Amino acid sequence: MPYKSRNELPDSVQHVLPAHAQDIYKEAFNSAWEEYKDKEDRRGDASREETAHKVAWSAVSHQYQKGQDNTWHRKK
């Protein structure tokens, strides 16, 4: 279930990440959704959706980090 816009992202993404980070999340999720469509391409028993979400969060964490104020900030 690829996402067409930020408005379609899960609440747990929309309400915690800045707009740019949401774009990163969406693009990474959609890419992983295609890349890991075959079960043998995924680790363990992870579903396609679970794998895509893990990839998306990982992509966000390359450019953003959670600060001491408990909000996400772009890395310097």
Image (cartoon, rainbow, N blue to C red):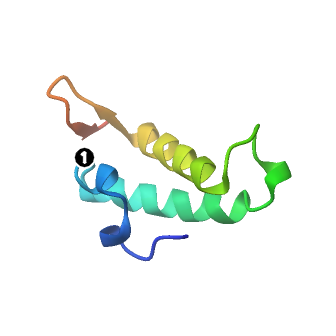
Give the image location of residue 10, x and y in percent. 36, 58
Give the image location of residue 13, x and y in percent. 33, 52
User: Residue at 33% across / 33% down in the picture?
Assistant: 65
User: Residue at 43% across / 55% down in the picture?
Assistant: 25
Which residue is tagged 1? Answer: 16
Give the image location of residue 60, x and y in percent. 42, 45
When the figure is inspected, residue 43 is found, relative to residue 12, above or below; the finding is above
Q: In which quarter of the image is residue 74?
A: top left
**Placement of the N terminus among the 4 image quadrants:** bottom right
Q: Which amino acid does label 1 sit on?
A: Val
In the rendered structure, the answer to whether residue 9 lies left or right of residue 52 reads left
Q: Residues within 10 Å of mark 1 (few under 14, many from 20)?
A: some
Q: Which residue lies furthest to the left in this view?
A: 69
In the rendered structure, the answer to whether residue 56 lies left or right of residue 6 reads right
Q: Which residue lies furthest to the bottom in this view?
A: 4
When the figure is inspected, residue 49 is found, relative to residue 6, above or below; the finding is above
When the figure is inspected, residue 32 is found, relative to residue 75, above or below; the finding is below
